[in-house]
Image (spheres, rainbow, N blue to C red):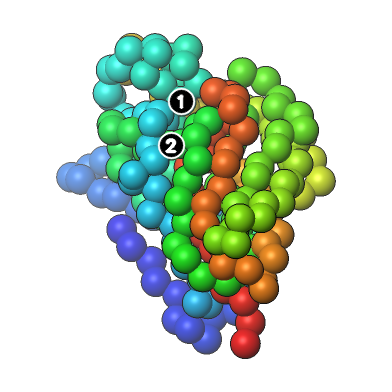
Amino acid sequence: MTLTASSSAVPTSAKITITGKSGDITHTAILPLAITQVMRGTVPVDLSHAYNVTGIYRNGSKFESKDSLDGVGFAFSEELIGSDQVGDGVVFQLGSANVADAVTSTTVELPSGTYSSLKLLAVGVEGTQESQTFTVNYADGTSSTSTQSMSDWANPNRFDGESVAADMSYRLEAHGESDSRHAYTYAYSIHLDSNKVIRNISLPNNRNVLVLAMTLVPTKK
């Protein structure tokens, strides 16, 4: 089922009731619905060249523990995480399930241009990952660093500069079942020098910091 909001819709939250009927059997589900205003003209970053971890699987999939988001046997459910998410005012485009779809410990090439900020959809795993350093490199050879503490994907700490993008009611286990603990994604923002052409970003050299998506916010003209 796809729900579409018109361009004139205002930000709000509500609940929708979905009822399914087959013969004499009826089932009703009540789901939360949120309409969130997002920035226009943002630029999604294609991470397909950089994916090096598989963190999203279809429900019922079985996988090796080492081939999971946290490296010990747990992953996001595609049915819950979807193909895109909204966080910190932008839309994040996610990779496909059951293949590499997250990035860790590498340098990611970015679309050339001038931008005001880089938004990240990311998580920490295996506990809180504090004071992680992200280095932005510009075409003129200069660079800048940003430090951000990141919550574990099962336990929001609400660090400065961090907001919850999605709260999912379960995550997947390597043997194909679901785990009842909630799983979260978080949105972060890295300030960019809008007078310089961006080249790439070097992520923390830490397997426990994983980026699922990036979106660039252009410089206002």
Residue 205 percent across, percent down from the top left: 59, 27
Ranked by sequence position, the earlier of labels 2 and 1 is 1
Identify the residue at horizontal 25%, vertical 49% (top origin).
Answer: 21
Location of residue 84 (image quadrant): bottom left
Residue 106 percent across, percent down from the top left: 50, 35
Kindly tell me whether residue 30 is visible in this rendering: no
Image quarter (top left, top right, bottom left or bottom right) of the N terminus:
bottom left
Q: Which is nearer the eye, 179 or 145?
A: 145
Location of residue 221 (image quadrant): bottom right
Identify the residue at horizontal 38%, vertical 37% (top origin).
Answer: 51
Residue topped by disc 1: 69
Identify the residue at horizontal 46%, vertical 25% (top origin).
Answer: 69
Q: Are marks 2 and 1 in contact (CB under 8 Å)?
A: yes
Q: Is residue 89 above or below residue 102?
A: below
Identify the residue at horizontal 69%, vertical 65% (top origin).
Answer: 193
Kindly tell me whether residue 7 is visible in this rendering: yes
Q: Which is nearer the eye, 168 or 19?
A: 168
Left or right: 13, with 110 as reference point: right
Residue type for callout 1: Leu
Residue topped by disc 2: 102
Q: Which is nearer the eye, 189 or 83?
A: 189
Left or right: 201, with 2 as reference point: right
Left or right: 18, with 86 as reference point: left
